[in-house]
Image (cartoon, grey):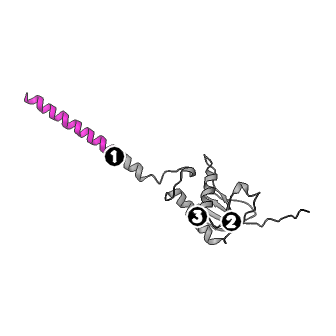
Amino acid sequence: MRASSELKRWILAAAVAWAAVGFLSELHGSLTRYDLRNDRPTLPALWHLGTRAPARLQACLAEVERRIPERTTVSILSPPGPAQAEFYRWRWAAYLLPRHDVIEEGSRGATPADYLVAFQRVAEDPELTPIFATAACRLYRMAPVERVATP
């Protein structure tokens, strides 16, 4: 009888140890995912203030705002992506540059822009004059648009 109760104790200790290891493993995985929450690439539609992706755009646009006069028209060029990524980056840029008119690069023909901000892209156009550049952010002055008077 003594051997039977000793065996039960060992089985109970093994079950408790197994449950503790499983619990600690799940806890470690959850905490790791929580710590890496800002490092995951997310769609611009899911961005939140304080996370890494909008902070990069905000740093870029802070440099832009220091270099351009108020009330200018700024065109935003960003990499294409799924789920209307360019549209949401444009909306973020409009939010982060409140003293400027911000348009999407694709709609530049309808509204002439004074400056072009290329976020995580390089723009190659002979009408563009580079003003400053970092690894992920470039600012260009647009060539003035000649307006034709209609009779």
- Which residue does the numbered mark 1 point to in the structure image? 27
Q: Main secondary structure of the magenta part?
A: helix
Residue at the far left in the pictured view: 2
Distance (Cα) linking label 1 and label 3: 37 Å
Q: Vertically, is 9 above or below 137?
A: above
Which secondary structure, mark 2? strand
Distance (Cα) linking label 3 and label 2: 13 Å
Query: Which residue is located at x 7 percent, y 30 percent?
Result: 2
**Number of residues whose C-alpha sits closer than 10 Å to that of mark 2, classed few (under 14), some (14–19) or many (20 or more):** many
Q: Type of residue at label 1? A: Leu
Placement of the N terminus among the 4 image quadrants: top left
Which callout, 1 or 2, points to the residue nearer the camera?
1
**Relative horizontal placement of residue 22, taking residue 61 as reference (left or right):** left
Picture disc at residue 49? none
- Which residue does the numbered mark 2 point to in the structure image? 140
Distance (Cα) linking label 1 and label 2: 49 Å
Residue 22 magenta: yes
**Relative horizontal placement of residue 18, taking residue 49 as reference (left or right):** left
Placement of the C terminus among the 4 image quadrants: bottom right
